[in-house]
Structures are given as C-alpha cells and as structure tokens.
Image (cartoon, rainbow, N blue to C red):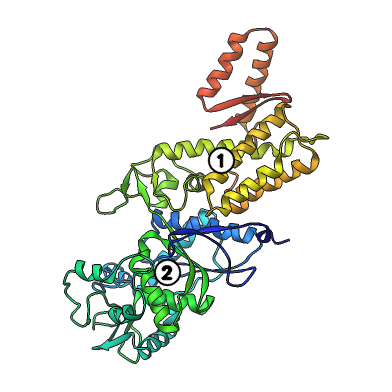
Amino acid sequence: MELYKHQNIKIYNSLTGEKDNFKPINEGYIGMYVCGPTVYSNVHLGNVRTFMSFDVIFRYLKHLGFKVRYVRNITDAGHLENDADVGEDKITKKARLEEIEPMEVVQRYTVDFHNILNTFNFLPPSIEPTATGHIIEQIELIKTIIDNGFAYEVNGSVYFDVHKYDETNNYGVLSKRKLEDLIHNTRALDGQSDKKNPQDFALWKKAEPTHIMRWPSPWSDGFPGWHLECTAMSTKYLGDQFDIHGGGMDLKFPHHECEIAQNQAALGKSPVNYWMHANMLELNGQRMSKSTGNTVNPDELLSGNNKFFSKAYTPSVIRFFVAQSSYRSILDLTDDGLLASEKGYNRLMDGVNQLDHLKASKTSTLDIATWKQKCYDAMNDDFNTPIVIANLFEAVKYINQIKEGSATLNATDLEYLKTTIHAFVYDILGLKNDKTEAGAGTDKLSGAVQLLIKLRQEARVNKDFALSDQIRDELAEAGIQLKDGKDGTTFTTN
C-alpha cells in the first residue's frame, strides 16, 4: 500500500515563499536534484548538514512509497573562485598548489566525501553525475541558448545575456532581487571587459594557456560555467521540468537563479516546481571560517581531536542534533548542544531497547493510532523533524508507563508502536542504535553494576535506605542511571 496516498505533504517553496501543497508531476514518482560538492577540499560540516537534511527528505519520500530518482552531482570542473567569473578554477588551483593532476584532486576529495557520508549513514543518491562527464550536453545546451537569442560569444567565451533575458522573463524570480538593484550595486571588476554587462554570467570560458582543465568546443578550447553544469545534468536525468531542487541557502543566488534563467532560455519553461534551501551551520554563534580558525571538519568532530568540543561524538548523536532543528533554521553547533543531544539520543535509544520486552495486554489505554499520525503530520509539515523527535519522546513515555504497569496496549497497538518507532528512528531519521540494551550486557561493566544493584536491593530489604541511596547516587555520578520497574531494576549509561 502506498502511504503517500493518505498523506498531505506541504513543502516550503523558496519560489513562492510559502508552504505549498506538494503534488508531483507524475503520481507516485518524484524527481529530486540536489547540488553536490565541488571536490577541491574535505567536505565542510555545513555541507554535511545540508546533505543530511535532504537525506532525511529522500528517506521519508521513499518510506511513503514514492519512486524517487534522487540526483546529486559532483562538480569536478568549472567552479571559479568568484561568482563574477574571475579567478582560477578551484580544482585547478588546488592541483597547482599541490603539484598534482586536477583529477587526482577530484579523486581524493570525492572519496573523502563518500567516506564521510557513509559514516553518517547516508543513503546513496540514485544517480551521481559529474560535470566533466557531461561536457557534450553542456555544449549542446549553450548552442540552444545562443540560437534562442539569450547568449553571445566574445573572444572564445560565451556569456548569458541577463538584460536580454529580463526583457521577457524575470531574472530574480527565486531570490526576489530586481535587475535594476543589481545594476546599481555592481562594482566594476577586472576581467569583465568581454561582457556586455557585469550581471551577465559565463556559459563557456576560453581557457588561458596555463589553464589545465580544457575541452574543445565550437567557440574555443575551454571549460563550462558552473551554473550550466546543474542545468545540463538535472534536465538530462529528470526531464525539462521536475519536482524538487535542493541545496544550501548560499546557492539561491546566483547559482539557482541562473539555473532557472538557463532552463527558461533554452527550453521555454521553469525547470522546478519546488525549490528547497537548507540554512547555514554556525560554530559557537559565529559563521564557520577557515580564515578566522572558527571551523571544525567532520573527522575532527567525530574523533574529538579539536579545540571546540569536550569529547568525541558518534555519527548518530550528530544526526540527532541536526534533526532537532528545522532544515530552514540556522543551526548553531556548540558543545552544550551536542552534550544535550547525546543525552536525548541515549534516552530515545533506551526506550527503543525496551520495546521487545513489553508485554501485550487485552486492552489499550493509549491512543497509538493518533500518536502515529502525529508523527506523519510532523513530517508532512515541511519535514518538521523537531516535532517528530518530540513525538518519539512521547512514545518513550508510553514505553515507561507500560513497563511500570500504569498503561497497557493490546497486541495490535503494541505492534503499531514498535513498527512506527523503528520506521521513524531508523528508516526516516537514519539513526543507528549505538547504545547497548539496558542491563543486558555481558561485559565486565554490566556484571559490576548488576552486583551493585543486588547489594542495593539487599539494603532496601534490610531497610538500610541510606546505603541504598548512596549506591544509586554514586552510580548516577559515574553516569549510570538506575531505573526501578515492576520487573526489577535496569540501568542505562550516559
């Protein structure tokens, strides 16, 4: 049964500035494109946050039964240092600094990108195309834009004519910027003498003699513009129009604005129905920046080898931390925030670990059907993971009530509770259970704690409550929490 037929999804659409009812172009099928990394350095934590948000969205749409074609590209050429089409290609510059081939740079950091995402339990996209693998498609797209009168060639480079385009279209429809304001605020920059106007952007750049990465084209030996790559790859694999285009907030202008213009100029239609943008990740209230030293990479965060955090954190704790904030909110990465998330994650997993020990009753005193729909309603409301987590903690409260005997579930409702929790924790949020089951370990720690639990029980029988409380309190100080239930005492570790 396709769950999507019974759910009403709303997506905040950057194009309209509102939460729009989601209706795919083809029922049961979704085309989703997310701008991937430019592979010239180790993947940034801010990028990981963006890709993690779309991983959850991908997971949820698949869970609902949609057939999702998720395309996330690799930019391995053409991304210059400056949006004004000046400076070196980022990959070429890295290759020159390290005195290696550009494709060695690409290989090294593509592998790093995949390794980091695998560590964080990402699902792979359906297709992961590269810019260099689609040079022919980009050249053909440029030809069409020129033929339609929206681009011009100068000295071997081809530029998109923004002013000509804006006469019949709206350059700024996504970012809500007006061309007149862009003209007023544009400074004269070196290296733009070939352009008719500073706002025009490159579709093809003629390679200087020292430029390493180059391909033949009708205009020159050169390389494609960064904006063009995504238009060529998205339309090839998802069609002239598709459902969802995602990326970081920093890509809304000019990158995504230029994508819309290119598609409109070449094909006469807007490419995407729903534009989604994930917000920034800050570090201790400030923007991450290599120049100021206010930055930490994923490996450093996972290993604890950094100056910002008191300990190492597991990938699932970091995923849990990210999911506690809306993808559209600025997220501030702090040690206190991660410590709180670690406690919350452990509490959630303690509840999950108790599920198999719950016993069904003849009747139910909890409304599991309503609780289950609340979980779906949260995800249907622009993928509101913080509310999903709040609902999961409500389920943990149910689990504790059932353990204590103050609430009951019949066999059917108990199974609904188990399957729904597993679906949202593992399949949708993408968490892994890194905690061992409470009280079930066979290692030395578990044996020692079980001995102390036994001594505490004996103290209580002998009415030596001072000793009983001392055992409980000193274990708590050591990060071991005792939980008394009708079936005995169990423990959890923080």
Which residue does the image show at 60% across and 44% down from the upper left?
Answer: 433
Q: Identify the residue at the far front of this view.
A: 168
Cα gap from disc 1 to disc 2, whole angstroms: 41 Å
x, y percentage for residue 402? Answer: 72, 31
Picture quarter containing residue 8? bottom right
Q: Earlier in the sequence, mark 1 or mark 2?
A: 2
Q: Is residue 57 left or right of residue 227?
A: right
Q: Which residue is mark 2?
A: 107
Q: Is residue 468 left or right of residue 229?
A: right
Which residue does the image show at 66% across and 7% down from the upper left?
Answer: 463
Q: Residues within 10 Å of mark 2 (few under 14, many from 20)?
A: some
SS type, badge 1? helix
SS type, badge 2? helix
Q: Nearer the viewer, mark 1 or mark 2?
A: 1
Tell me the quadrant of the picture where the N terminus can be found.
Answer: bottom right
Which label number is shown at residue 390?
A: 1
x, y percentage for residue 163? Answer: 28, 79
Q: Is residue 418 left or right of residue 40?
A: right
Q: Is residue 77 visible?
A: no
Which residue does the image show at 31% across and 69% down from the upper left?
Answer: 90
Vertically, is 3 above or below 443? Answer: below
